[in-house]
Structure formats: C-alpha cells, structure tokens
C-alpha cells in the first residue's frame, strides 16, 4: 500500500478514485437495462461492468460528459483511440483536423470540436489550421489537451493575466469550464514575442496545482523542468513541451512511447488468435475457404483508411502511362 493511501481518509480515497461516479453509472446502466437483466444476474452485471472499467472499454460509444468525467475515463479513451486508429501512423497517412475529429466522433458521437481544434493548434500553431498532420503529432498533442483540459484552461488564463501585467496576487483563475476559458485562451503571443517570465509562471502554476489536487494535471517536477529551460516562455512553447515530454506520457499511462507507437502486443496476439481460428474453420469447412483472405494483413483489419478521403502521394501520381497503354491496345 502506498504512503499516500495510508495518509488518506476513506472519503478522500473514494474522491480520488471517483468510486461513487462509477457506482452511480453502474446503477444507471442497470436501471436502463432492467428488462434484460434477470434478478439472479445482477451480481454478474456489476462484475462485468467493473471489469470493463478496469480494462478501459467502458467509455466506448459513451457520451462526452461520461468520457471526460474522470482521469481514468480520459486515459481509457486515449488508449482506445490509439488502438483503433494506429494503422494511420503505420500507413504514413496525413489527415486534417476535421478528419481527426471524425475519427474521435466514431468513438464518442458528441465529442466537441473545440477540443480537437485546440489539439491541432498545438501542432500547427495559429497558421493554416487546415494543414495535414501525422497521427503521432496529433495524438500526443491531443493527449495533453484532452487529459489536462481544465488545467490548461486555467494555465491559459494565468498566462494571459501575466501578459497584461497583473500581479501574481491578483491572478484570476476560472473555476469551471463554464467560465468561458476558450475566450481567455491566448491565440497569439504577439503582445510579448518572448512570452512571460518562466519562474513567475511556474509559481502561479504551483499554486494552481495545490488548489486542484484531485484534477488531472501534469506532475510539478515536469512543469519545473520545462519552465527552467529558459528565462521566458510562450504559452504555445509550453504546450509543445508538454506534448513532447516522455515523463508526462508515462504519468498518464495511456499511450506507449513514440518509438513503440505502432506496437500493440495484446491486440496483435488477439488478432493472431482470431485469424488462426478462421483458418482452422476454413480447413474444416472447405466451402468457407474462399471467404478468407489469402494472407493475414494486420494493418488492414481495422484500418479507417477506407472511410477517409483518399490522397495519393506525389510518387504515385499518374505519369500518363495508363493512357499510353489504352492507346496501344486500341491500335
């Protein structure tokens, strides 16, 4: 048992783990499906629900309010997004912000577009928001924007106050998403090209982390490391440093490091098992043999590429050889 757990009271531990949130959701799900659940199967229903919570599959196709309501839910959604669409990185495809948003809506139908836009802005800055992005660049930017959304909204408000010369003691921090944080988020550092004083910014963020103990926030040592790299820092420089920081990625625990972005041993083993079963079935029942592909191609099993506008790379563009072939055939 960790020292932090020993120092916590029962209510503090329940609040940190959001146990009541999951209990309420489990009861709501049970009431919604009460006609399908036999009284003798209620215990099994709860067991399966909390198993899905443990495995992180409980957020699939749920509304955004539930997906983002706990840090565990956010990490689970990030991992699902990576596992479902990692083949985009393997294929080397570049997608626009709107296309990434469509992929997010496939997992969460009411996923808000402003979160996707903020993540894209970390990659593209303020220029050309319709430019294409690689999956890895978008994924790690999206991770910090989605997982630390409230913290970043508050940090943006603090940064804006420091830009306008407000004292640390009078910094105004929004207390909820309803405080229109999007309007306070700086869209440009043109007022101060060098950004704000890094030590002063860190002191404000340290106070913020102290107030928001139970919310999702980056580890303070990582923030200190980023802000100690230069005497002044722009807000987008801060965001980009967070997105590229390996320690933050490890602290969230949803995604592999960038070098292993294409690897998912658990999913690949499951696909191997399914394909082996289908192959055995085709041998036992020859009539189904023609329904199976000639060879296994894991990269195409769950690829979303077919659902997206196709873009041919320059080296694959037609050089007129097709027309020449057709002309020769006519002759």
Image: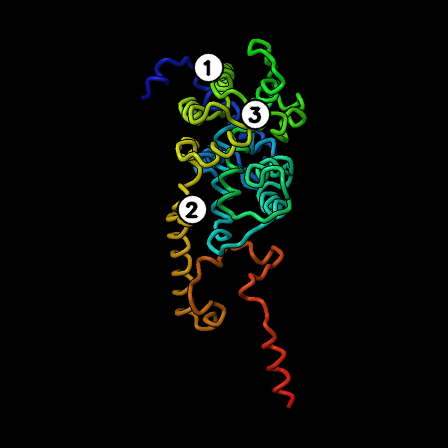
Q: Which residue is mark 3?
A: 150
Q: Position of residue 269 (x, y in %)?
A: 37, 52
Left or right placement of residue 64 versus residue 257 in this view: right
Mark 2–mark 3 Cα distance, whole angstroms, equals: 26 Å
Q: Quadrant of the C terminus?
A: bottom right
Upstream in sequence: badge 1 or badge 2: 1
x, y percent for residue 54? 43, 34
In this view, the residue in front, 190 or 37, is 190
Residue hosting label 1: 11
Name the side, left or right, on which 205 lies relative to 118. left
User: How many C-alpha atoms fall within 10 Å of the one at disc 2: few (<14), some, or many (≥20)?
Assistant: some
163 horizontally vs 218: left or right:
right
Please name which of the two marks, 1 or 3, marks the residue nearer to the observer: 3
Residue drawn at the location 48% of the way across and 19% of the way down: 202
Mark 3 Cα within 10 Å, few/some/many (few <14, many 20+)?
A: many
Q: Name which of mark 2 and mark 3 comes first in the sequence.
A: 3
Could you tell me which residue is drawn at 40 percent across and 69 percent down?
284
- The image quadrant of residue 29 is top right
Residues 105 and 231: in front is: 231
Q: CA distance from mark 1 to mark 2?
A: 38 Å
Nearest to N terminus: mark 1 or mark 3: 1
Which residue, given by chain and number where applicable, does mark 2 sit on?
261
């Amino acid at each position: 048992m960790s020292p932090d757990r020993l120092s916590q009271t029962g209510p503090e531990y329940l609040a940190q783990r959001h146990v009541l949130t999951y209990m309420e959701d489990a009861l709501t799900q049970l009431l919604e499906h009460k006609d399908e659940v036999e009284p003798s199967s209620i215990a099994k229903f709860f067991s399966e629900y909390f198993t899905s919570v443990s495995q992180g599959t409980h957020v699939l196709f749920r509304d955004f309010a539930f997906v983002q309501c706990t840090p565990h839910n956010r990490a689970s959604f990030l991992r699902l997004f990576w596992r479902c669409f990692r083949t985009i990185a393997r294929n080397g495809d570049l997608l626009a912000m709107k296309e990434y948003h469509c992929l997010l809506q496939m997992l969460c139908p009411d996923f808000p577009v402003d979160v996707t836009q903020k993540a894209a802005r970390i990659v593209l800055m303020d220029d050309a928001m319709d430019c294409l992005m690689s999956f890895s660049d978008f994924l790690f930017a999206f991770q910090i924007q989605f997982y630390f959304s409230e913290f970043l909204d508050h940090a943006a408000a603090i940064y804006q106050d420091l830009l306008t010369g407000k004292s640390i003691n009078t910094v105004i921090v929004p207390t909820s998403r309803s405080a229109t944080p999007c309007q306070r988020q700086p869209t440009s550092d043109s007022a101060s090209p060098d950004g704000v004083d890094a030590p002063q910014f860190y002191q404000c963020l340290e106070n913020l982390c102290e107030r928001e103990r139970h919310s999702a926030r980056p580890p303070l040592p990582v923030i200190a490391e980023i802000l100690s790299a230069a005497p002044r820092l722009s807000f987008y420089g801060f965001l980009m440093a967070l997105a590229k920081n390996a320690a933050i990625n490890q602290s969230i625990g949803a995604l592999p490091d960038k070098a292993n972005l294409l690897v998912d041993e658990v999913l690949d083993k499951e696909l191997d098992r399914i394909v082996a079963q289908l192959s055995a079935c085709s041998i036992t029942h020859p009539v189904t043999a023609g329904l199976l592909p000639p060879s296994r191609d894991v990269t195409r099993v769950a690829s979303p590429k077919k659902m997206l506008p196709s873009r041919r790379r320059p080296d694959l563009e037609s050089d007129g050889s097709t027309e020449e072939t057709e002309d020769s055939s006519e002759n």
